[in-house]
Image (cartoon, grey):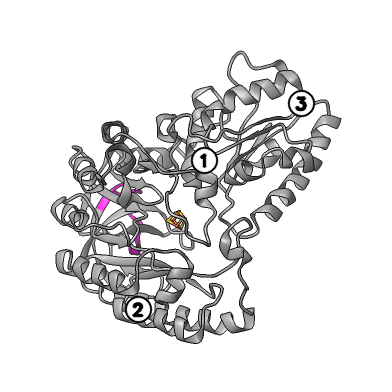
Amino acid sequence: MNTHDSGRVAGLLESLGWRAAPDESSADMVLLNTCAVRENADNKLYGALGHLKAAKDARQAEGGDLTIAVGGCLAQKDGATITERAPWVDVVYGTHNIAALPRLLEAADSQQIPVVELVEALESFPSALPAKREVRHHAWVSIQVGCDNSCTFCIVPALRGPEVSRRPVDVVEEVRRLVDDGVVEVTLLGQNVNSYGRDLTGRSHFAELLRDVGAVDGLERVRFTSPHPRDFTEDVLHAMAETPTVCEHLHLPLQSGSDRVLRAMRRSYRRDRYLALVERTRELLPDAALTTDIIVGFPGETDEDFSETLDVVGRVGFDQAFTFVYSPRPGTPAAEMEQLDPDVVRPRYRALEQLVRAQSLEKHTALVGRDLELLLESPSRTDPSRLSGRTRGNHLVHLPAGDGYAPGDLVTARVVEASTHYAIAAAPTQVRRTAAGRATELALAAGGDWHADAAPVVTAPEGLPAHAAARRLPVHPG
Ligand code: SF4
């Protein structure tokens, strides 16, 4: 969600004429989009602000300036505390008023004092703002913000407020515009996508939305995150199975396999419900990849609770699991509970890691010999002679780079090797060029970058104060 907000902030500022700086030292403004969900978020923010104070002092000593803005959910939580602890910050804004950022920057500039503005309710849906995409072929589309649940480990409801769904017609319209702009894959984004629409009409419309988005002409792939096992209804599985563009991948957070721990987490489903949902998914979508999130060492978790988690993981057989050692988030009920000894948690985490790694290897090995459609994403991070792509099940696959295809294109290639974190494929046997792939190829040939909008640095928009000329903006996702 924060990455998506960063794209919105960058898009909003670019629409006003600002451009990204290649690095922090040449930037005239630094905007920190914070995330309170992350571990040690406070320490990281104030550490970064301390570092920025030195940069701002140095700039001012040379007769210039460095504007510092802080947004995101930690800003929503701490508000004016940020400018009390770091009075050199120019602007603080919250999760609900991103659209106000240009006005707040102007106010800080003219008043020469820190401007803090937080609002309690959403002013405008983030997706209504212009967006900057990281890559040409993919876009995040926010369908819902906030959350009506109250998981005891999570700070999101306190910071993002109750669920607010975006009108289906607006979601579909945005997807159409994105496809016109070269996007072939969208990920629908919400804290609890299965309850999408409940605040609009009293019932979930997520299955209909999947069908409507999936029918947009020119769109190749639809993904979504995150569903909630309690609210997941079978009509969503039918929509997935019957809409060819919706990928066969379900990320279904488990968090714990113990009913006792789920109760303490206030996750209002139980292991049987979870396992039944997995079984039904496998009946309706036999080829679906399943991924999950699991927390180890939640307060009160016993050896028996943990073995129930291992049991559920063993029964499901995940393609990938994101595993976390529980760490308290200030302001959440679980932070007040008695915490477990890290020496007790560490071996549990290792045991779970071992199991999920073995499962991932098994799933990747099962792909060997198959000809799979891959959406090419980027050059490989570790080997420039390779490209990286994703199967419809979201498995990472590396394959040889070559002429006639580029990130953004769809190819078919045979998987020849498997490892825990990825698979390797041979050169493609089929290539389907896309507008995004062609644009990336042209950008690379011109010495550019595979990222979207890798625009050169330009001067600030007309009308900005004189000292703001040639300002450039790096955006740091939280
Ligand atoms: Fe947080 Fe639970 Fe809502 Fe997810 S469903 S955002 S974990 S409160």
**Cα–Cα span, label 3 and label 2:** 55 Å
Q: Tell me whether circle 1 and circle 2 mark residues in contact (CB < 8 Å).
A: no
Query: What residue did someone put label 2 on?
Result: 312
Is residue 353 visible to us here? yes
Magenta residues, as a range?
394-410
Instruction: Name which quarter of the figure residue 334 lies in.
Output: bottom right
Q: Quadrant of ligand 1?
A: bottom left
Q: Residue at x 63, y 73 (%)?
A: 338
Give the crowd class for mark 2: few <14, some 14-19, many >=20 residues within 10 Å.
some
Q: Residue at x 26, y 42 (%)?
A: 434
| As drawn, 95 above or below 409 | above
* Numbered disc 1: secondary structure: helix
Q: Tell me whether circle 1 and circle 3 mark residues in contact (CB < 8 Å).
A: no
Give how far across and how far down residue 376 sits, in percent. Answer: 33, 53
* Numbered disc 2: secondary structure: helix
Q: In the drawing, what numbered circle is on residue 20?
A: none
Instruction: Name which quarter of the figure residue 95 lies in.
Output: top right
Give the crowd class for mark 3: few <14, some 14-19, many >=20 residues within 10 Å.
some
Q: In the drawing, what numbered circle is on residue 113?
A: 3
Eye-nearest disc, 1 or 2: 2
Query: What residue did someone put label 1 on?
Result: 6
Left or right: 19 as drawn, with respect to 143: right
Q: Amino acid at mark 2?
A: Val
**Cα–Cα span, label 1 and label 3:** 24 Å
Q: Residue at x 58, y 57 (%)?
A: 38
Is residue 294 visible to us here? no
Task: Give the main secondary structure of the magenta stretch.
Answer: loop
| As drawn, 80 above or below 412 | above
